[in-house]
Amino acid sequence: MNTAETLPPKPEILLELHNVKKYFPIKSGVLKRVTGNVKAVESVSLKLYKGESLGVVGESGCGKSTLGRTILGLEDLTDGKIQFDQQEIQDLKKKEKKKFVKEMQMIFQDPYASLNPRQRVGHALDEVFRMHTDMSAQERKTAVMDLLTEVGLKAEHYDRYPHEFSGGQRQRIGIARAIALNPQFIICDEAVSALDVSVQAQVLKLLKTLQDKYNLSYLFISHDLGVVRYFCDRVLVMYLGNTVEMGDVSSIFKNPLHPYTQALLSAIPRPTVKAKKERVRLVGEMPNPANPPTGCPFHTRCPIAQEVCKVDKPEFIEHRENHFAACHFPG
């Protein structure tokens, strides 16, 4: 038997980032001259495969939400390349980008803020089809009712206003809007963080069901490591706009390489006393992204930092199979 025939098929790359940067200029003086930059995202490179869920974690201010908004074009790219379905999209004009709107969508943390409180939910979802399809009014209404049913709501909810729904139901409406145009890729930006735990489980189950049904790829941005462990296939850890570690969920949670990842994981509550591990406490706060430290961006808070960490920025390289880290002393 040919051994090549027994190997599983190589996963297809849907999204690829090459040294993506997003800087926000700092302007001062009467003439508003640029005097510096807030380096929100610094040289991020990654691959997202079709049908995969990639979790992005890190403290508030680490750049994970800015990364998501930059991928979608909601923030202008400062430098780097973004490839979607084998096509570079960072330099496309508005008309050329329009076709990618159908393929790339976003689910926001606060669905109520993204809905017009004076507009019935059915009409809000109808706008998606009216703007991007040639459907008749009756066809659009039927499609919207099918969408509501798809996400666990009822067709009769078509005529209700956003304030008549619970938080979990409003998030289902946000999901319905995201999947309306049959996208390949959805960014979930803290999509369940504002929900009760029981409702979180229901929404995550819905997202999993939709992923299996439509082969969706998710970039799942979250600060809840427990949710990421349950939902995602791989994890990307960010600190001060930089990628510090990336790998399979099991590898990251069982054998983290970077001291920052180890500190994050040690803060997860343990269900039993026996399972309790020593807490890795970080001293100080995250440095100002407008004036990041030299060398390793984490060295000012790292418990194992040495002199080389203050001078040389470590490369983001593979230390174990499919497990990458940017650390001089990975452990």
Image (spheres, helix red, strand yellow):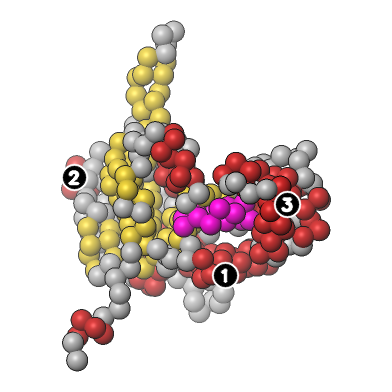
Q: Quadrant of the N terminus?
A: bottom left
Residue 116 inside the magenta-drawn segment: no
Secondary element type, mark 2: loop
Residue drawn at the location 27% of the way across and 61% of the way down: 324
271 in relation to 25, above or below: below
Residue 314, how many percent across, how many down? 22, 50
Q: Which residues are magenta?
A: 175-188
List x then y, in percent, for residue 89: 36, 42
- In the image shown, does 226 or 230 lie closer to the viewer? 230
To which residue does mark 2 refer? 312
Q: Which residue is mark 1?
A: 209
**Is residue 291 something one can see in this rendering?**
yes
- Residue highlighted by disc 3: 138
Question: Which quarter of the image is occupied by the C terminus?
Answer: bottom left
Tell me the mark number nearer the camera, choosing from 1 and 3: 3
Q: Name the disc covering residue 170, or none.
A: none
